């Protein structure tokens, strides 16, 4: 019987190393699943947020598609780890079958969180800088350097951090868990929260690594996401397998 142990920082390095190896062993799949994000990002830059409808559509598309892309990457890592063969039809078949499982609920939850944060950000801007509504904030950055502007940025940073950590805590384990076990998404999220509570120091570092790597990948016209996203997806599966022994009682 496998005994549970606490995660360490070395687990992050090992998971990332395994993620790189998985990507190199099946690069076409990783590039396929990450291509949506790169193309959508390029379109957003091209539009320069000038079309609200398209910007909103593409922004909502990220949280909707993300769970399905993640499932594809997890399934590849699972099969490589188990020594099982895989083909395009088998991997895409697993992703397609998730449409009738619990994964869409995670996507819906992410959309709700996205919409909540969008509303909250606009509300906080109105509360702090409502009297400057005639100012063009896209060109008048000095507005944010005022005491009121800095207070708003600090408030949004703290509030955004709380939302980001809670979202991360609910999904870091639940997404691979839904692929690994036949459970409902509520159980998956509760299990993820318990796992986060048990391993929060290391998982917070993992979340920071994800944020930093994704940020760096965004700089060169989103092109870096072609490699970073699949590596992180594969690595997440391998980190999950290190947490899995502690979930046996969940």
Image (cartoon, rainbow, N blue to C red):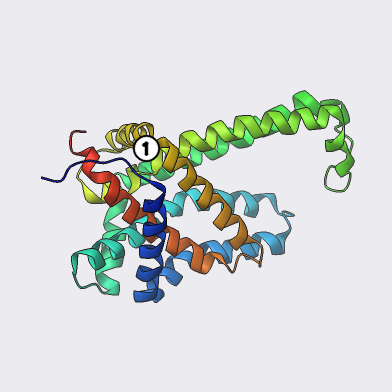
Residue at x-position 57% and y-position 67%:
224
Residue under the point 27% across and 72% down:
89
In this image, 51 relative to 231: left or right?
right
The 10 Å Cα crowd at callout 1, few under 14, some 14 to 19, many 20 or more, is some
Quarter of the figure with the N terminus: top left
- Image quadrant occupied by the C terminus: top left
Q: Quadrant of residue 18?
A: bottom left
- Indicate the position of residue 159 as horizontal and vertical percent values: 61, 29
The quadrant in which residue 115 appears is: top right
Q: Tell me if residue 150 comes above or below residue 13 in the rendering.
A: above
User: Is residue 101 visible to the viewer in this orientation of the structure?
Assistant: no
| Residue at the left extreme, as displayed | 1
User: Percent from the top left, x then y, of residue 150?
Assistant: 79, 32
Q: Is residue 32 above or below residue 134?
A: below
Q: Quick check: can you spot residue 186? A: yes
Q: Compared to 115, does 2 lie above or below?
A: below
Residue 70 in the image: state x and y as whole percent. 38, 56
Vertical side of 134 occupied by 74: above or below: below
Task: Report which residue position mark 1 lands on.
Answer: 199
The x, y position of residue 137, in whole percent, is: 84, 42
The residue shown at (53%, 46%) is 208
Nearest to the observer: residue 182 or residue 193: 193
Q: Nearer the viewer, residue 148 or 183?
A: 148
SS class of the residue under badge 1?
A: helix
The answer to whether residue 183 is left or right of residue 57 is: left
Q: Answer with the quarter of the image where residue 243 lies.
A: top left
Total tally of numbered discs in the picture:
1
Residue furthest out toward the top? 127
């Amino acid at each position: 019987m496998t005994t549970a142990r606490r995660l360490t920082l070395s687990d992050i390095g090992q998971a990332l190393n395994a993620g790189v190896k998985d990507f190199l062993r099946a690069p076409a799949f990783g590039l396929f699943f990450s291509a949506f994000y790169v193309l959508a990002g390029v379109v957003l830059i091209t539009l320069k947020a000038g079309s609200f409808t398209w910007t909103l559509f593409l922004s909502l598309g990220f949280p909707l598609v993300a769970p399905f892309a993640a499932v594809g990457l997890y399934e590849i890592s699972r099969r490589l780890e188990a020594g099982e063969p895989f083909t395009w039809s088998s991997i895409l078949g697993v992703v397609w079958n998730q449409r009738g499982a619990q994964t869409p609920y995670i996507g819906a939850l992410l959309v709700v969180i996205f919409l909540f944060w969008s509303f909250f950000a606009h509300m906080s801007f109105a509360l702090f800088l409502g009297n400057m509504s005639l100012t063009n904030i896209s060109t008048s950055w000095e507005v944010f350097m005022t005491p009121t502007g800095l207070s708003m940025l600090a408030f949004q940073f703290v509030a955004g951090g709380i939302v980001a950590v809670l979202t991360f805590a609910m999904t870091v384990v639940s997404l691979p868990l839904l692929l690994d076990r036949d459970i409902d998404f509520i159980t998956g999220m509760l299990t993820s929260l318990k796992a986060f509570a048990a391993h929060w120091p290391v998982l917070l570092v993992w979340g920071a690594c994800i944020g930093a790597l994704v940020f760096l990948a965004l700089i060169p016209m989103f092109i870096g996401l072609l490699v970073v996203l699949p590596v992180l997806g594969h690595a997440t599966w391998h980190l999950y397998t290190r947490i899995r022994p502690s979930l046996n009682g969940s």
